[in-house]
Structures are given as C-alpha cells and as structure tokens.
C-alpha cells in the first residue's frame, strides 16, 4: 500500500480486501481522517497496526482480519468513538486487550479469534451496551470472565473457547436475553488444545445457553472439529460468509448454518476434508445411534464432494430424529 494513499484526504471508504497485498500498513493511511470504513482483510499484510490509527476518529468499521499482523492492539483505537465493528481475527497479534477500548460505547462487534493475545478480559468492556458479538476464541487469555458482561443485553454471539480462562462463569451470562446455543461457546472439548478451566457448579442458566447443545449441534461440532480451516470461515463471524455466497445461501447464520459449515469445509480443505469428515462421521454415529451408510464408510480415495453431501444428509437425519424426540 503506497504512502501516497495519504493524499486522498476526502476519502470516506477504503476497501482493499481479498487481494494479495503485502508489506505493512503505512502510517500515511492515518491521515485519511474522513474515513468511515477501512477494510484491509484477507491480504498478506505484516508488521504492526499503526500506533496512530486512532486519528481515524470518524471510523465506523475497521476490518483487518486474515493477515499476518503482529504486535499489540493499539491503545489509540479507543479514540474512535464512532467505531461499531472491529475485526482483528486470524492474525498474530500479541499483548493484552487494552482496557481503554471500553470507551467505544457504539461498538457492536469485537472479533479477535486466532491471535496470541494474553491476560484478562477487561471489566471496562462491560460498558459496551450496544454489543452484539464478542469473539476471542483461540488466544491465550487468562483470569475470570468479568461479571460486567451481564451488561451486554443485546449480545447474540459469545465465543471464548480455547483460552486459559478460569474462575466462576458469571451467572449473568445466563440472563442475557438474546444469547442462545450454539452461538455461546465457552469451551470446546473437540480440540486438543488448552481449554478453559471453569469452577463448578455452573449456573443453570449458563448451562442452558452455553453447554446444552442438542444432538444436531453436537454433530456439527464433531463433523467439523477435526478440520481447523473450517473454523476460519464460521458463517456467524463478520466477514466470514465467503463460502455462504458461493453456495447462494440466504440465511447462513440461522437455519442454513449447517449447510454453510459443510460448504466452508469443502472449499477450504478440498480432499483433506475427506478423512476428517469420515473419522468425525463415525464418531457422530456413536453419539447419535444413526447408521453410517456403507457407501460413505468406503468412500476413501474418491472426490470429497459426495462425502460432504453424505455428511450433510447424516446430520440432517440426526436433526430430524432430535426434532421428533423433542416433539
């Protein structure tokens, strides 16, 4: 990205997403104080986020996901008082979560999954009264979940799994009116990584929202857990519905989530999805008592697409069984 970009002082929207841009984010970009949207995600950018990025005080959307950015999250982001979406997923960011970001009282989405962030979740983030989505899975966060998360009354997505969080899960999470499984994930035993170690007993309301996955959701986790790239394009994450668009899905965050996840796995993993899906499907069989078709079990060495379709069919059947049992 050339330094001359700083001369476009009347620019309000800069989208350079989904390219093969390399190098660092130039400090000159911070001169574009009229920007409302800055989207640089899905490139190959390296280095640190400019410390002066907070000069973009009119910014509403900042998307830096899926690069190779390093260093800390700049404290100056707290100066972006109009910021609604902050996407930092899939980088190599380190350091702690800046408590000063609690000043962003218009923030609706905070996403920083798959980084190297450490330390606690700041209690000051409880000031985000407009927050809809908070995703910090796959980091190295420690300490307890602050009780102030109970102020997130509009929250619909909460992902904190695969960290080193401890202590008592706040009962306030169980009282969040818009939060429901499977969009609340505090642990994920399907991954062979460090998992959060929460104290028991866990509040009943929290169990219902964050741990009581029905059988269909259990299959969803087991079918896709062994293929790490599948999580890369979770359809519930901002900017992560590329595969949903390819599949022409209209509602990938709700009733089409399962189909979208399968498409994401197929597009990301290709042939490698074959063995992952086969092993996971056999594991799903033991969970659901749903017979695995012989054609699926003998599918090694063939094109992966029929296998994915077979997995979708299996999970759909499992969902029907679960629905009938509930009825």
Image (cartoon, grey):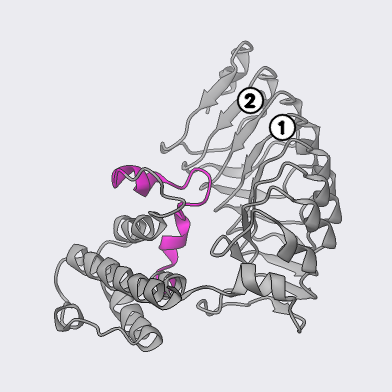
Residue 186 visible in the snapshot: no
Q: Is residue 277 left or right of residue 305?
A: right
Q: Is residue 267 above or below residue 219?
A: above
Inspect the magenta stretch and tell me whether residue 140 lies in it: no
Helix, strand or loop at label 2? It is helix
Q: Nearer the viewer, residue 99 or 204?
A: 204
At 47% from the left edge and 43% from the top edge, which residue is drawn?
42
Q: Which mark is residue 241?
A: none
Q: CA distance from mark 1 to mark 2?
A: 8 Å
Q: Position of residue 168 (x, y in %)?
A: 80, 75
Residue that protrudes farthest toward the top in the picture:
10
Residue 131 visible in the snapshot: yes
Dot 2, how many residues are within 10 Å of its Cα: few (below 14), some (14-19), or many (20+)?
many
Q: Position of residue 319 (x, y in %)?
A: 37, 70
Task: Report the residue marked by disc 2.
Answer: 29
Dot 1, how many residues are within 10 Å of its Cα: few (below 14), some (14-19), or many (20+)?
many
At 74% from the left edge and 50% from the top edge, which residue is drawn?
153
Q: Which residues are magenta?
A: 225-248
Q: Is residue 61 left or right of residue 238?
A: right
Q: Is residue 224 left or right of residue 275?
A: right
Helix, strand or loop at label 1? It is helix
Task: Report the residue marked by disc 1.
Answer: 53
At 64% from the left edge and 41% from the top edge, which residue is drawn?
86
Do the residues under discs 1 and 2 have CB atoms within 8 angstroms? yes
Q: Nearer the viewer, residue 224 or 315?
A: 315
Q: Is residue 148 above or below residue 128?
A: below
Q: Is residue 297 left or right of residue 78?
A: left
Q: Nearer the viewer, residue 61 or 217?
A: 217
């Amino acid at each position: 990205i050339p330094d001359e970009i700083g001369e476009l002082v009347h620019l309000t929207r800069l989208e350079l997403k989904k390219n093969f841009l390399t190098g660092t984010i130039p400090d000159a970009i911070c001169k574009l104080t009229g920007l409302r949207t800055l989207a640089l995600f899905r490139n190959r950018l390296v280095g640190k986020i400019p410390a002066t990025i907070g000069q973009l005080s009119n910014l509403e959307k900042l998307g830096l996901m899926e690069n190779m950015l390093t260093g800390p999250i700049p404290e100056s982001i707290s100066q972006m008082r109009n910021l609604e979406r902050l996407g930092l997923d899939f980088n190599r960011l380190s350091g702690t979560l800046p408590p000063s970001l609690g000043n962003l009282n218009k923030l609706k989405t905070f996403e920083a999954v798959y980084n190297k962030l450490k330390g606690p979740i700041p209690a000051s983030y409880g000031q985000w009264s407009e927050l809809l989505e908070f995703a910090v899975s796959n980091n190295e966060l420690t300490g307890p979940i602050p009780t102030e998360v109970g102020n997130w009354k509009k929250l619909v997505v909460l992902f904190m799994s695969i960290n080193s969080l401890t202590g008592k899960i706040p009962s306030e999470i169980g009282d969040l009116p818009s939060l429901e499984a499977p969009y609340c994930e505090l642990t994920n035993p399907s991954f062979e990584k460090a998992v959060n170690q929460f104290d028991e007993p866990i509040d009943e309301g929290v169990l219902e929202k964050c741990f009581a996955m029905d059988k269909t959701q259990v299959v969803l986790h087991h079918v896709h857990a062994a293929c790490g790239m599948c999580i890369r394009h979770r359809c519930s994450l901002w900017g992560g519905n590329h595969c949903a668009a390819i599949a022409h899905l209209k509602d990938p965050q709700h009733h089409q989530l399962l189909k979208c996840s399968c498409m994401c796995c197929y597009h990301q993993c290709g042939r490698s999805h074959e063995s992952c899906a086969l092993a996971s499907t056999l594991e799903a069989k033991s969970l659901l008592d749903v017979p695995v078709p012989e054609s699926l079990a003998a599918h090694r060495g063939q094109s992966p697409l029929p296998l994915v379709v077979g997995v979708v069919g299996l999970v759909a059947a499992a969902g029907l069984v679960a629905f009938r049992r509930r009825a």
